[in-house]
């Protein structure tokens, strides 16, 4: 496993982190706790030292599983979690006030819940789970976050940038309030490249790249015939003719597989790691086999400039979450 600086925080994090949304069971139907625990342990065995979760993932279930694993481990493992918006609206709608989303006492209460689930006395990174640029001009939330940091219950502060909207967090990057920024970044969504990633690099912010596989499409696992269990959020994400749309685009991507990347999943991860601004990539990997395949990509090799240029043509602006 190779490691990178988490911005200018002083932490060194594994290039491949662990995205723990799938451990929550509520949104990803079919998750098995025993397999999830095995995958977490295997990830740490292979050098993963950055785990990303959230209070909203299974109403704390993901955090609780992570706490169970870390109780038995002695390695240094950093945990990032998130405060859900009080109004439970993802993404944060424009015009909604901080009082409805992140009032100060609510932030503190959520942090305390996360600490209990994790069985820890501090969180390494506490992130707001949604963001709007207007939040910067409102009060309440700042004092709560800075107070938690001063008390030692939180080491670093971050935000999870709204889906496909890097411009909404540019002012936040330069504000100096946040240490890390989590953002969607993958072959299809390359929107952070022109401004957001250069700004983070310039300001020394840690970048956590989420959804590297576009919820599964960039692994090649989604076909027009794919079926998801009832209640699984992917029924919406890949609703209508979207499975056909992604399948057709993925077939074109397959033509780029060669010695630099032998599988689509490897290509997707290497695309994210090709950016110097990216500190860590957090694929979801509930199964041990996926942990082993994904962590193997952290071998120090970078995509060639020629292949990176070819991948630019596969950018596909759209929002399947809405």
Image (cartoon, rainbow, N blue to C red):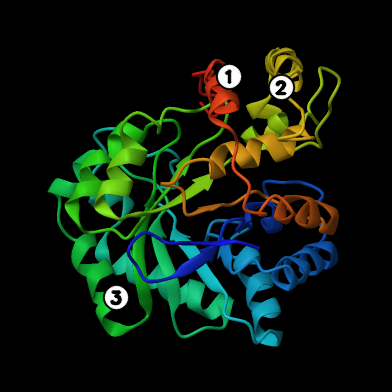
Determine if residue 232 is in view.
Answer: no
Q: Which mark is residue 310?
A: 1
Marks counted in the figure total: 3
The residue shown at (75%, 27%) is 257
Residue 198 percent location from the top left of the image: 32, 39
Q: Which residue is mark 3?
A: 149
The answer to whether residue 145 is above or below residue 153 is above
What is the CA distance from the residue labelled 1 to the residue labelled 2? 8 Å
User: Are there few (<14), some (14-19), or many (20+) residues within 10 Å of tag 3?
Assistant: some
The answer to whether residue 78 is above or below residue 128 is below
Residue 25 percent location from the top left of the image: 72, 54
Mark 1 vs mark 3: in front: 1
Mark 2 vs mark 3: in front: 2
Relative placement, left or right, of 183 versus 210 is left
Q: Quadrant of residue 64?
A: bottom right
Among the two numbered marks 1 and 3 on one chain, the one whose residue lies closer to the N terminus: 3
The answer to whether residue 266 is above or below residue 125 is above
């Amino acid at each position: 496993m190779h490691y990178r600086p988490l911005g200018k925080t002083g932490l060194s994090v594994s290039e491949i982190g662990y995205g723990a949304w799938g451990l929550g069971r509520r949104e990803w139907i079919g998750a098995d706790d025993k397999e999830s625990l095995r995958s977490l342990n295997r990830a740490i065995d292979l050098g993963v030292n950055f785990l990303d979760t959230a209070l909203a993932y299974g109403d704390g279930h993901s955090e609780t599983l992570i706490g169970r694993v870390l109780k038995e481990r002695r390695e240094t493992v950093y945990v990032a979690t998130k405060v859900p918006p009080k109004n439970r609206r993802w993404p944060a709608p424009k015009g909604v006030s901080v009082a409805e989303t992140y009032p100060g006492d609510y932030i503190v209460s959520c942090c305390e819940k996360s600490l209990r689930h994790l069985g820890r006395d501090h969180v390494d990174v506490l992130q707001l789970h949604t963001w709007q640029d207007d939040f910067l001009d409102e009060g309440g939330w700042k004092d709560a976050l800075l107070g938690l940091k001063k008390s030692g219950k939180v080491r670093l502060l971050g935000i999870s940038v709204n889906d496909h909207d890097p411009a909404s967090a540019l002012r936040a990057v330069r504000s100096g309030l946040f240490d890390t920024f989590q953002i969607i970044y993958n072959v299809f969504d390359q929107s952070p490249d022109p401004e957001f990633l250069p700004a983070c690099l310039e300001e020394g912010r840690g970048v956590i790249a989420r959804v590297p596989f576009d919820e599964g499409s960039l692994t090649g696992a989604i076909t027009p015939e794919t079926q998801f269990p009832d209640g699984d959020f992917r029924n919406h994400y890949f609703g209508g003719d979207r499975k056909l749309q992604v399948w057709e685009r993925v077939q074109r991507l397959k033509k780029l597989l060669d010695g630099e990347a032998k599988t689509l999943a490897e290509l997707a991860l290497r695309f994210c790691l090709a950016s110097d601004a990216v500190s860590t990539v957090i694929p979801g990997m509930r199964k041990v086999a996926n942990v082993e395949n994904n962590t193997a990509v952290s071998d120090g090799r970078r995509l060639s400039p020629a292949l990176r240029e070819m991948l630019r043509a596969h950018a596909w602006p759209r929002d399947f979450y809405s």
